[in-house]
Amino acid sequence: MTAEQGSATAVTRWGVLATGGIAATFTADVRRLEGAEVVAVASRSEASAKAFADRFEIPRAYGEWAGLVADPEVDVVYVATPHAAHRAAAGLALEAGKAVLCEKAFTLNAREARELVALAGERGLFLMEAMWMYCNPVIRRMTELIADGAIGDVRMVQADFGVQGPFGPDHRLRDPALGGGALLDLGVYPVSLAQLILGEPDRVQADALLSPEGVDLNTGMLLGWDSGATALLSCSVTAGTASTATVTGTAGRIELPSGFFAPDWMVLHREGRAPERIKEDSPLTGMQHEAAEVMRCLRAGETQSPLVPLDGSLAVMRTLDAVRDRVGVRYPVDATS
């Protein structure tokens, strides 16, 4: 951790690496966050970077990643590339001495994730996966209720995330080299929710419909723990599912609504009591929660977030690797693992 990253400066200066839809959503949210300023953007296309900078009134635009990570006015880099480029982009920023918030799925496989975590550790730099679900106030309240025994011992997690599609053969979601398929884009959320509650599973089973290119289009997962708990999870890029989640324990259950990964409310069911609708009020919205957590960590001199710990991100990647192994999905990068 550099002196600059550990300082309690009034403003945290963000650099956004990539200019796609998720980068635009994040930038729009962060620009409205007190104490945050987006000072630079980078793309592999100078025209794209300049258009993005104009759209969001960002002072500096770079037509290559190296310019952004070398910018002395940038405190933290938000990596918003497709996941196939996460290892290279986040690694470049860490090598340049920058703190990093990297989109999920963290990387293409567990090996790449280990490499990033090791690099951040060697450099003493902050690194966090952008699993905004973990920073959501309702999700945080849910974990508190579970820890306090509100639903007893957790026995089952059910969650799904599916979008209708269709996605043609030329779409990135059909390209193995780009980490295509439902699992890394969508399945990472159900898996991350289950592991937030139960930790890394002891057993992984899975089945999937594969595309002609060899990526998963429709995937079901059954995770098991030695405690007796199970998780029934699914993801799809061929069917629009309810995208809800339920956590059931020996004394009740918690239901999360559609869009369970960013909920505004939940319902707590306990035997002998009326269902309780719980809403967590917050002045922050959307991706502001994860950005605020990054900024808090940097000002406190922390190299990782207790809300999104690196060990948890590594464990999720190991599970995603195991799912791909069970269904027969391999990416070209796996050959070097």
Image (cartoon, rainbow, N blue to C red):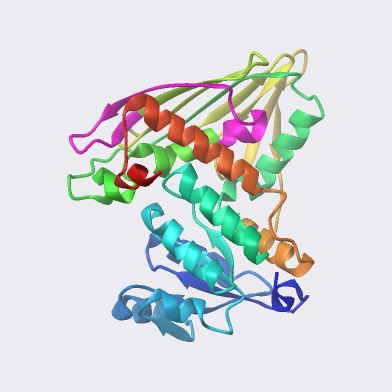
Residue drawn at x 78%, y 65% as measured from the top left: 300
Mark yes or no: residue 107 visible: yes
Which of the 4 image quarters holds residue 202? top right
The answer to whether residue 269 is left or right of residue 182 is right
Residue 214 belongs to the span the image colors magenta: yes
Q: Is 57 placed above or below 91 here? A: below
Q: Which residues are magenta?
A: 192-218
Location of residue 76 in the rendering, given as x and y in whole percent from the top left corner: 59, 71
Occupied quadrant, residue 1: bottom right
**Does residue 285 appear in the picture of this structure?**
no
Q: Is residue 82 left or right of residue 260?
A: left
Rendered residue at 56%/45% (across/down): 262
* Residue 83 coordinates in the image, percent (x, y): 40, 53
Q: Is residue 330 above or below residue 268?
A: below
Front position in the image: 123 or 301: 123
Question: Does residue 206 appear to the left or right of 144 in the view shown?
Answer: left
Q: Residue at (52%, 53%) from the top-left corner? A: 115
The spot of residue 187 in percent (x, y) is: 44, 36
Q: Is residue 327 above or below residue 25?
A: above
> In this view of the protein, which residue sits in the foreground, 111 or 172?
111
Residue farthest to the right? Answer: 148
* Residue 328 position (above or below residue 123): above
The C terminus sits in image quarter: top left
Position in image of residue 103 (x %, y %): 49, 55
Number of dots carrying numbers: 0
The one of 172 and 71 positioned closer to us in this rendering? 71
